[in-house]
Amino acid sequence: MYKLKPVVPVPSLGESTCRMYKLRDLQQMSFSEMPTGDKSDELQDISDDAQLADQEIQVLIEKQNEVLKILEQLELRLNKLDVKFPDAKGSVPILEKEQSTQCNVKKNPISSSKPVIINDIENLIKNDTVVFADPEDPPYSLLALQILWPSVAWDISYHVHSSVLKDLKAFESIKAFKNVTCKDNKSMVKVFVIWKHIKPNPKVIRSSTDSSIGEVSLLRTFNQYLATQPPTAADQIKSDKVLDLINEIGYSANDRTTELHSLITDSNTKLDITNIIIWSLLYKKSEHPPKIQKWLSHFTKIIIV
């Protein structure tokens, strides 16, 4: 029914006239009859290759033995060593070192509570603090870290996320924020601020399991480690109540500026975290009563240089 092409017989063995590499001819070796004539040269090459392979194996074995001897010697040396890392308490405290001239921090007298700060700062420097901040709503309290805790070696760096690179308006709002660097690398508190459009803002990250939201949480975190004088129980309850109220006002959908105004008194110009956060929230707004504007100007002259 169908016409097929004729089958062409093909020899079982093919002989190549041009060989790039001299390899063992497995087909020839499987034959019972050994080749004669010119094939004897190929067999000689095969025996040479086999001998060369054995020499290479011997070299590898010798190299392996040398490596094993070196590892045994290293193991003996490590067993003799006392592998104990120094305790963090043995490090030189930041307050006992000379302040770097690169830090724009006002030098204040060191209080008698210095040991408390030293013990807590060692826990603070274990993890760097990363702050994701929205350039359209900058957390201006970042500018007051050096003022609130002047005896600490700060390393504050600001970075712009790729999503904000083309936003010229964002760059205009964050021009007041400048990097702060110190020479001390051992007992330095590092803060990485990343400008990125994020809500809610700011987001504070200390580790994979330690994150919080808001300027209140940001300053509370540092105050937990850097407070020079632990407050009394009554003062702590009062302070927490005010800070919780400020945090609620800051993230409220309604305008509650008047409630922030009620927390301000003309005589209360203390540079503490409560007043700094109130100033940061009100500084972003344009219109205020004369008394409030005077209060804001007082902090603005100190914080924004």
Image: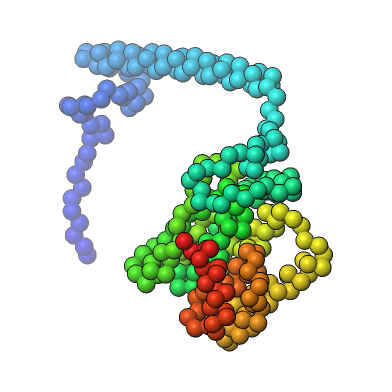
In this view, the residue in front, 46 or 166, is: 166
Q: Position of residue 218 (x, y in %)?
A: 61, 63
Residue 174 x %, y %? 43, 66
Question: Would you identify the image quadrant in which residue 95 lies?
Answer: top right
Q: Is residue 152 left or right of residue 89?
A: left
Q: Is residue 61 left or right of residue 214?
A: left
Residue that appears at 67% across and 47% down? 110
Q: Which residue occupies 25% across, 13% down?
A: 41
Does residue 72 appear in this view? no
Q: Residue 204 versus residue 45: which sits nearer the camera?
A: 204
Residue 117 is situated, as x and y percent measured from the top left of the image, at 70, 49
Residue at image coords 63%, 76%: 266
The residue closer to the viewer here, 76 or 56, is 76
- Viewer-side residue, 76 vs 89: 89
**Image quadrant assignment for residue 72:** top right
Total number of numbered discs in the rendering: 0
Residue 104: image x %, image y %?
50, 51
Report whether residue 231 is seen.
yes
Q: Is residue 265 above or below residue 97?
A: below
Quadrant that contains the N terminus: bottom left
* Residue occupying the far right of the picture: 233
Report which quarter residue 164 is drawn in. bottom left
